[in-house]
Each structure stands twice: as C-alpha cells, then as structure tokens.
Amino acid sequence: MGFFLTIEGCEGAGKTTAKGVVLHWLNANGHDVIETREPGGTPLAEQLRGLVLARHDETVTDTAELLMVFAARSQNLSQRVEPALAEGKVVVCDRFTDATYAYQGGGRGIDEHCIAILEQLVQGDRRPDMTLLLDIEPELGLARARGRAIEQGGILDRIERETIEFFHRVRQVYLARAERFPHQYVVIDGSQSIPEVEAHIIKALQCRLL
Ligand code: Z5A
C-alpha cells in the first residue's frame, strides 16, 4: 500500500537536484505522487523547521533540537505521509529519520537508543521503503551549499554553520546505516556530474517501481 521514498545526504550533496529527477520520473511513469520534507511538510511542522534552523540568542540544547525534529515528524506523518500512503500514493520525502540518526546522533552525539525510542513512539513500524543517499565528501558538499548561499545572498542556518568534523560524523552515520539496511538504501556518489547522478537515480527507480 503506497511507497515511501526518502532522500538523504549531507549539505550540498544534491538532494534537491535528485528530488527533481525523482518527481519527474514518477510523474512520467504514471505514479500518483506527493512531495514533502523534514523537518516540515505541514504549517505547524514548517514553523518547527524555522525554529530548528534559526539562530537564537539562547543555546538550543541537543535534546530540544531532537524533540523539535520529532514533533515536526509526528505532524508530517499524521497529516501528510500516512494518509497519502493509505491512498496508495508514492510519498517523496526530503530527509526523514535517517537524518536524525545522522545529525542528532552522529553530529550531536545523542545516543542512538534514545533516537530509536522516539522513532518507535512517533512512527510505530513506519520506515522508508527506499532511501536514496547522495553521498559526498563534506568539504565538497559544503563548498557547493555555501557557494549557493552566497549566490542567493542568504546567510547560513544554524546547522550549516557547524564544523567540518560535525559533517564528517554525519556522513559516517549515513554510510553505516546504508551498510546495515541494504534493502532500504541506495547509495549514489554525489560527486559525479548531474547527468551521471540522474542516470543512477533512474536505474534505482526502475528496479523498484517499474
Ligand atoms: N535535519 C536534522 O538535523 N535532523 C533531522 O531529523 C532532519 C533534518 C530531518 C535542513 O535540511 C536541515 O535539517 C539539514 C539537516 C537538518 N541541515 N542543515 N542545514 P535541508 O535538506 O532542507 O537542507 P540542506 O541539507 O541544507 O539541503 P541543501 O544544502 O539544499 O543540500 P542539497 O539539497 O543536497 O543540495 P542541492 O541544492 O541539490 O545542491 C547544492 C548546490 O550544488 C546547487 O547549487 C546545485 O546546483 C549544485 N549541485 C547539485 N548536484 C551537483 C552535481 N552533481 N555536480 C555539481 N553541482 C551540483
């Protein structure tokens, strides 16, 4: 019933670009699709996203960040993801709980068992059917993401301002999870050219959804 596809990766890995390829392919192949993102996806969850990413005068504790991410997830799941899956749709979600293991677990150092407890509370047995992981050396990804931020005249958000070591830990958790859950993950080298990345994504979609 339905198909839950998530897209993951470090900053600048090419998730946004990949999402465009995925949506185009799914629509062209006659799938009924909805798109969402995390944190976010509903008005309340988008407000929580704003709080997670904004810079604040007070220190945001790692626990508060973790709980905000899961609060947003609860809203997105109940209002968007679960109803769409129940109608047999393909749900394309830009980041999901694998990002929590990577950023709050790997990056911030929160015990993965604590994350697993919240995962069970918020999601029950719901897990992605497929995760496209755009893998990239953090140095390259951050250079891309920061280059784009400068181009757009924007400022870096609270997480984008983290150290390079933080993003190396994030990447290691993603890669470890990809090894642990090979039935879920498809790892794509995000340092390749856009047409090469696109070809790998389409091949992965054809394997699972044709
Ligand atoms: N977060 C969290 O901490 N815990 C959680 O549980 C969840 C999330 C769910 C928001 O995510 C933040 O939330 C994120 C983790 C945290 N951290 N931060 N900050 P987001 O996904 O909305 O934001 P992001 O990770 O910063 O996305 P991004 O920087 O937009 O990355 P991207 O989508 O992977 O990149 P892109 O826009 O596709 O590409 C970046 C640039 O590179 C752009 O100019 C492209 O044209 C270029 N590009 C893309 N692909 C290529 C290739 N192949 N070659 C050359 N250039 C390329």
Image: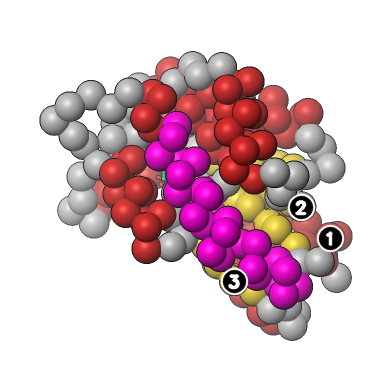
Task: Describe residue 159's horizontal placement relative to residue 26 as left or right.
Answer: left
Q: Nearer the viewer, residue 47 or 190?
A: 47
Please state the horizontal and vertical placement of residue 19, each as a whole percent of the image.
56, 61
Residue beneath disc 3: 34
Amino acid type assigned to the residue bearing label 1 in the image: Arg
Could you tell me which secondary element the residue under label 2 belongs to? Answer: loop
Mark 3 C-beta closer than 8 Å to ligand 1: no
Q: Is 60 colored magenta in this rendering?
A: no
Quarter assignment of residue 64:
top left
Q: Mark 2: few, some, or many residues within 10 Å (few <14, many ≥20)?
A: some
Q: Do the residues under discs 3 and 2 have CB atoms within 8 angstroms?
A: no
Task: Describe residue 51's horizontal placement relative to residue 174 as left or right.
Answer: left
Disc with the residue nearer the chain's start (3 vs 2): 3
Which label was assigned to residue 129? 2
Please state the horizontal and vertical placement of residue 48, each as a whole percent of the image.
35, 48
Disc with the residue nearer the chain's start (2 vs 1): 2
Image point (47%, 23%), residue name:
107
Which label was assigned to residue 156? none
Magenta extent: 66-95
Please state the horizontal and vertical placement of residue 206, each as a whole percent of the image.
82, 65
Image point (40%, 39%), residue name:
68
Task: Describe residue 104's horizontal placement relative to residue 142 as left or right.
Answer: right
Amino acid type assigned to the residue bearing label 2 in the image: Asp
Say which of marks 2 and 1 sits in front: 2
Can residue 30 be seen here? The reply is: yes
Which label was assigned to residue 208? 1
